[in-house]
Image (tube, rainbow, N blue to C red):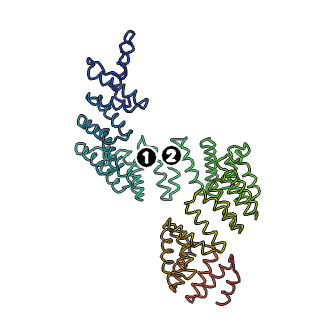
Amino acid sequence: MRTHNKRLRSVIMSCWALLLVPGCATNMPEPQTAPSRVLNNEAATTYHYLLFEEATRVNDYSRAEDALSKLLTLEPPAEVYVEAINFYLRTNKTLTARRVAVKGLKRFPDNFQLVLLKAESYRLEHDLDDAVEVLRTYLESHPQSDDALRAIGLLYYDSGKFPEAVDAFRESPDAHRSPVTRLFLAKALIQLKKYDDAEKELILVTEQKSSLLEAWSELARLYELKQDYLLAEKAYEQLITVDTSNEVSWLRLINLNLKLNHPAKALKLVQIGPTSKDFTIEAATIFISEGFYKEAKILLDPFAEEKEPAKVFFHLALIAFEYEKNPKKALTLLNNIPESHPSWIKSLEFRSRILYELGKTDEAIVLVQAARKRDPQSRFILELETELLMTANRQKDALDTINSALKIWPKDQELLFTKGSIYHAMGDKKRALAIMEEVISRDPEHFKALNFVGYTLAEMGKDLDRALVLVRTAANLAPGQPYILDSLAWVYFLRDDTKNAWTYITQAVTLGTNDPTIWEHYGDIAKKRGNRAEARKGYKRALKNHASPELIRKKLKDL
């Protein structure tokens, strides 16, 4: 029985002992047979509970319900009601569970488990108000119950209502507030960015003898949010002192030391920390992400010598490419990853990127096409091949590849958008525009297609009002995108609204971009506003990578 009721347990064991007495075995009742009328209430309760337990063990829910229905007529102990409610909640019979809870509470009105389960029956129906009301009713007769107030707070917390959660947790008088309630109060305060108040609660928890490890973890996380890395480090050190096997805390502590520019100490922590391979490799990835390639290599090299696990070769290739500036070595390292390994797809992309960097785009395409023959329905490989073909100005081949993808995923808007982009690159703007309009009709919030159509209409001098609506919508859906802000600026420019045009083109370049078209637009708008210095700045930046440098030189000359 899933209960701590020792009395009922002892009764059950006594009955089993009686059944096992020699000579009595022939008198054992069949499992489905009703108990003898001579059985008293306690023995009948035990008997039907055994039937219930056996039925649930073999997942015979019908027989389990039958046993429960008889059990609940025998005035069983509170633990049986708890067991029954849990059973009905597990089997999605919420209303039945609630009826049992109501019945149980009539006999055991002070049993908090029954109160919680009744509240849970409402929570499962997303009825937060009634769930809270159940607990509030309990509080009327138990006004100092920290458990009840914490339960109310958790209901609000789990529903994302953090202000209400804080209020509920704080209703528990400070003198009676348990460490668990303080912990969850702090978590709710953190959600509301009330870091100082949360810190006070967490410190009170950690100062107690039986302090919760989770409190130290939350305190460390809080200090990270406050960017107080030294205090965060102390909190994590406390955590790993108490729980040396907690790999997450070790990794957070390593990361903090790297943020504090203490790579030697971070490396030492890896060496004295957990000994699992996964821990060491995960630590190495943190060193890489923070730019400490030399130390990462120290950690990974022993695995490479053993050629196990294969994923280390991906990390070592990244180090060879980014840190050692040795792309050929990176390629060699990536060749150690077999096709059957989960890292192989990532390595395929990496190898193709390296080949592209080395000016070997054709080799990269051959590599990816060979992979597609082995896995013709891999979306990743199809998209990578399309991208490489476009880079190599092989638009017709790219179109064939994207059409192959669309045969597999005919309703995919991203693939259709890519197809429109290919036609645009081929100079077929009419077909490109028609495809992009189709994307918008299927997905009115596809911001890339909205931007494309709006910008293209503006460039064609058609329907500038609609162009503005489309590009504005794209900008709202994807804020902070330089190329969309450039489109918005250009539509305003073509509408002779240089004030708004300048506002948005300035935002575009402020966000950081090397796009020559954006800088050309910057120059054009500045020139129209009479700002020759800024126009010259824009044209000079555009000249670096522009497809028509002569056009930009002419604009500079005409200033």
In this rendered view, identify the residue nearer to me: 485 or 145: 485
- Can the viewer see residue 502? no
Q: Tell me the amino acid under the disc marked 2.
A: Gln
Q: Position of residue 202 (x, y in %)?
A: 42, 50
Above or below, 331 against 83 in this view is below
Q: Residue at x 71, y 83 (%)?
A: 550
Q: Position of residue 189 (x, y in %)?
A: 39, 55
Image quadrant assignment for residue 260: bottom right
Q: Position of residue 261 (x, y in %)?
A: 61, 57
Image quadrant assignment for residue 523: bottom right
What mark, if any, has residue 206 been given in the picture?
1
- Can the viewer see residue 70? yes
Above or below, 494 against 130 in this view is below
The quarter of the rendered structure image containing the N terminus is top left
In this rendered view, identify the residue nearer to me: 111 or 215: 111
Mark 1–mark 2 distance (CA, rounded to whole Å): 10 Å
* Classed neighbour count for the residue bearing mark 2: other residues with Cα under 10 Å, few (<14), some (14–19), many (≥20): some
Mark 1 or 2 closer to N-term? 1
Disc 1 to disc 2: CB gap under 8 Å: yes
Taking the image as shown, residue 515 lies to the left or right of residue 181, namely: right
Number of numbered labels in the structure image: 2
What mark, if any, has residue 238 been given in the picture?
2
Q: Tell me the amino acid under the disc marked 1.
A: Thr
